[in-house]
Image: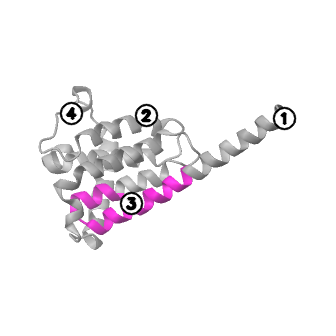
Amino acid sequence: MVDLHGHGGSRPLLLMLLACLCLPPIMGLGTAMSVAIIAIAWQWGQPTAAALPQRLARARLSPAWSRRTLHALAWLHDCAAAWIRPRLTWLAHHSLSGLWALWIVWMALLIFIPLPLGNILPGLSLIALCLGWMHRDGLLLLLSLLVGAIGSAYASGIVAVAVLAAWRAWGSVYPPLA
């Protein structure tokens, strides 16, 4: 699959596949995938793609999973061809790849945090980023920022509630001395 997308499309494709794997609410899966997402972010925008690790390059899917994956990718690209087009292409310019790499790392960190349903919005943000990058659709890149910002707000809200609950629990166990 990587060879079919060529040098320029292999990183976004791999990132999109990893982001798709983060979407199901399976405990620990997003945490494991976030490490690989950060590794892809490290190389984002580099002119030449680093070789895949041998173990990953040798990985093969069964015929059934190959068929399912290719059908899903074909469906995704078919949808993309219907309504995604090059616009605001300056957002997908190589000079901004460092900023997009930071965004990818931020989304990977949000995925890494074990929050209930906390992987979904960052995963969708990364999928939008990959499609926007591959098709040079700046509007989709902006959508990636919006979805990721909502995911950041969700994670911040859950952390704030947890800190407040811990603070109140601590205060009930150890009341302040008057």
Give the residue displayed 17% in from the left and 54% down from the top.
94
Mark 3 or mark 1: name the one nearer the start of the chain.
3
Mark 4 or mark 1: name the one nearer the start of the chain.
4
Mark 2 or mark 4: name the one nearer the start of the chain.
2
Q: Quadrant of the C terminus?
A: top right
According to the image, label 3 marks what residue? 145
Magenta-tinted stretch: 128-155
Image disc number at residue 175: 1
Q: Quadrant of the N terminus?
A: top left
Give the residue displayed 22% in from the left and 62% down from the top.
135
Q: How is the image coloured?
A: one colour
Q: Is residue 154 highlighted in magenta?
A: yes
Q: CA distance from mark 3 to mark 4?
A: 28 Å
Amino acid at dot 1? Pro
Badge 3 marks a residue whose secondary structure is helix
Badge 2 marks a residue whose secondary structure is helix
Amino acid at dot 2? Ala
According to the image, label 4 marks what residue? 52
